Image (spheres, rainbow, N blue to C red):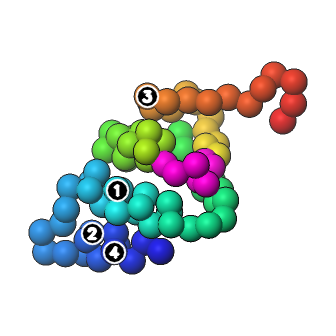
Amino acid sequence: MGESALASLAAPQPLPEDAILTILINDLARIDIDLVLILDDFHVIENPSIHEGISFLLDHMPESLHIVLSTRSDPPLRWRAFAPATGW
């Protein structure tokens, strides 16, 4: 999984970021199990292109992918979900 996306990053003329993410998302969609991606200390990321890439992933991720974002401040993302007030 992810080998095509990684190869695209290493190419002399890399594909646009959203094309590489689309390749990765398609790889993830082919997996028959639920996956959890944990992104810890997200507040230290300041690069806007990374925030845009994560937003793209959140907008297009397969149903089998679950993302846990750990941060000390509100991330500059277009999409957010919060744990219910009754638990977690």
Q: Do the residues labelled 4 and 1 touch (CB within 8 Å)?
A: no
Q: What is the three-letter code of the residue carrying label 3? A: Arg
The magenta segment: 61-67
Label 1 sits on residue:
22
Say which of 79 and 42 sits in front: 79
**Where is the C terminus found, in terms of image quarters?**
top right
Q: Which residue is drawn at 35% across and 40% down?
A: 52
Label 3 sits on residue:
78
Q: Residue at x 62, y 30 (%)?
A: 81
Above or below, 29 against 1 in this view is above
What secondary structure is found at the residue carrying circle 3? Answer: loop
Specify which label sits upstream in the sequence, 2 or 1.
2
Q: What is the three-letter code of the residue carrying label 1? A: Thr
Label 2 sits on residue:
9
Above or below, 22 against 60 in this view is below
Marks counted in the figure total 4
Distance, label 4 to label 2, CA atoms, is: 9 Å
Label 4 sits on residue:
4
Q: Residues within 10 Å of mark 4 (few under 14, many from 20)?
A: few
Distance, label 2 to label 3, CA atoms, is: 25 Å
Q: How crowded is mark 2: few (under 14 residues within 10 Å), some or many (20 or more)?
A: some
**2 or 1: mark nearer the eye:** 1
Q: Are marks 2 and 1 in contact (CB under 8 Å)?
A: no
Q: What is the three-letter code of the residue carrying label 2? A: Leu
Q: Which residue is drawn at 35% across and 56% down?
A: 21
